[in-house]
Amino acid sequence: MHRRLTPLERVMWTLGLSSPVTVAAVAHIRGRCSPDRLREAIGAVRQRHAMLNVRVSAAGPMKALLVDGPPPEFRVVPGPWTAVVEREVEEPFDGPLTRFVMIETETGFDLVMVSHHLVSDGLGMAFVLRDVVAHLADPFLPRTVVEAPTLDALVRAMPRPKRLRPFRQAGSAWPVRPRPADQSADRSADRFALVTAAFGAPESALLQERCRTEQTTVHAALGMASLLAVAELDGITTRQLYSPVNLRPLLPALPSGALGQYAAEFFTWVDVTAEQDFWTAARRLRETLRDQTRPERLIRAMRLLRLSGLVPNTVMRRLLRVSCKPGSSLTLSNLGRLPFPTGHGEFQIESVHAAVNMGTLTNGLLAAVTVDGQIFLSLSTRAADRPRAEQLVKGTIGRLQDALH
């Protein structure tokens, strides 16, 4: 591979020059496996996904190149897995922009995939983990290559979207939660931290059924619950909710299971005091998000992103530095149900967690993944905010439970 970075890739890479832009996915797998056997499976999957082998080579003030590199690093380390992830997402990439870590457990192993965010979105990482487990179960599976065309090329090939009325939403002031003075000089306070929890399978099923009855979505319900929980902690009732949007359903030419960056992030202002009833608020949030992320709007936004190719790297770096999310924002990334079976021969994927280190997290990024009907939550935050993050996750689950009963 030897090509210029696309506009979206270039934004991710430029942001990563001054701030971590690292994502991780962890699959908890039941089934015995030796490190050598897992290393062989990762090698086979590397031939299937070309993006597992790439690195970035700078090539001038207006561009950078994506080129082939050595194989991804593979290591076996002791647990616990949360501490491993917290350490790995802070480690810079030296060469390949992806690495794998194995943590052996009593009943199986945890497989951690860590990538620069320009390599993959969360769903792409899940596909890679699926392929590794499938190869472990059947080493003689055909090693077919999954093409991964760039998002930019796919969008250019699509018909020009029709004109839509502009999406407008009332803005708000920036009620940034200040960092305590005694933590501002403590570098350890800025280290990455991960808080995890699970919403039980019966409650997850009840939540999905209730969302259908209330004509809303699990994503909107999770969003309202987390916004209410964080508002209870700091008293800020109006804030921005960022939501990564999966663009794969809009790209009919994209092969199934491709590894790449096929997501875009949008935000909306939410006032949690506007509605007292939880489900009314969740329906309103769902309608706002649906209007904001109509296919025509998403395609138009991706076309406009191409203009970033005219901005020099140094200028883009300064712009990204001043446009980081303020402390009044919260990001919710809901991968939803895994779109593939979790059982492969003697191996069973029991859960999946996700972590994102963007270096600018304050209220954090809440990721949700549904595995066999159970919702697993992971909140990416800073070490100084770990106690508060634990309260936020606990409060989110509590709000959902209250809404169900």
Image (cartoon, rainbow, N blue to C red):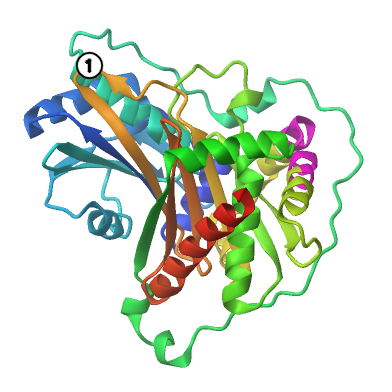
In terms of image quadrants, where is residue 373? Answer: top left
Q: Is residue 222 above or below residue 170?
A: above
**Secondary structure of residue under mark 1:** loop
From the image, which quarter does the N terminus lie in?
top left
Q: Which residue is tagged 1?
A: 345
Q: Nearer the viewer, residue 40 or 70?
A: 40
Q: Residue at x 36, y 72 (%)?
A: 383
Q: Which residues are magenta?
A: 287-300
Residue 264 x %, y %: 61, 42
* Magenta stretch encompasses residue 293: yes
Q: Nearer the viewer, residue 294 or 63?
A: 294
Q: Residue at x 47, y 92 (%)?
A: 181
Residue 120 x %, y %: 44, 37
* Magenta stretch encompasses residue 212: no
Q: Nearer the viewer, residue 100 or 85?
A: 85
Any part of residue 152 in sight? yes
| Left-right relation of 36 to 265 | left
| Left-right relation of 154 to 145 | right
Residue 283 x %, y %: 76, 45
| Left-right relation of 223 to 52 | right
Q: Residue at x 68, y 62 (%)?
A: 240
Say few, some or many: other residues with alpha carbon within 10 Å of mark 1 (under 14 / 14 to 19 / 20 or more).
few
